[in-house]
Amino acid sequence: MQWEFTAEQVVKGEIDYDIKAFRRDFFNEVCSNMGSMLDDHQLQACFDQLYDLTYWLATGRPLESFPQQSPIDAVSLAAVAPNLASNVEMLGAILQRLVMDNVAAGFPLDAALAGAAERHAAIVDESPVLSQ
């Protein structure tokens, strides 16, 4: 995806771009690339897997250890992963901002990281993108 702002601006708090907005924009990107080929259920499953991969990479974990799941096989994910670089960078910036906000609120780093992960999980659980 392309934005009119940078990941650095998000990290610095100059731009308010959150997980919900990122997921909406990322879903729209997946739809524009694959929506005509998939039904709603397949599209949601594809988005979920690509989003999970983006989160996996944004949190510093290697592609090789990403848990294999349907609908996209490991070979296809390896081919797609380089195209996710800007998304990985932006989601990483959003997550880093969450951690920084937690630290600024007085949480120790471990708690700040855990809080950001919990907040992310809650947002993902409460916001199925296809139903928006």
Image (cartoon, rainbow, N blue to C red):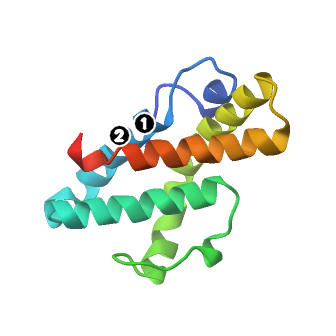
Look at label 1 and name its amino acid.
Answer: Lys
- Residue 14 as seen in the image, left or right of residue 54: right
Point out residue 54 in the picture as x, y percentages from the top left corner: 52, 57
Relative to 52, say whether 130 is above or below. Answer: above
Q: Residues within 10 Å of mark 2 (few under 14, many from 20)?
A: some
Identity, as a three-letter code, of the amino acid under mark 2: Arg
Residue found at x 54% / y 76%:
67
**Residue contact at pointers 2 and 1, CB within 8 angstroms:** yes
- In the picture, measured across the screen, residue 46 lies left or right of residue 94, that is left
Whole-percent x and y of residue 20?
Answer: 42, 36
Return the mark for residue 109: none
Q: In the image, what residue occupies the spot 14% across and 64% down?
A: 39
Q: Is residue 83 visible?
A: no
> In this rendering, would 77 be left or right of 102?
left
Instruction: Give the position of the C terminus as an image quadrant.
Output: top left
Q: Compare residues 127 and 86 and report the one nearer the observer.
A: 127
Quarter of image, res 55: bottom right
Quarter-of-image position of residue 120 = top right
Q: Nearer the viewer, residue 84 or 105?
A: 105
Asked whether residue 72 appears in the rendered view, the answer is yes
Depicted 64 relative to depicted 130: above or below:
below
Viewer-proximal residue among 7 and 20: 20
According to the image, label 2 marks what residue?
24
Q: Position of residue 38 (x, y in %)?
A: 17, 66
Taking the image as shown, residue 15 lies to the left or right of residue 110, namely left
Tag count in the figure?
2
Tag of residue 20: 1
Eye-nearest disc, 2 or 1: 1
Q: Residue at x 45, y 56 (%)?
A: 51
Q: Residue furthest top?
A: 14
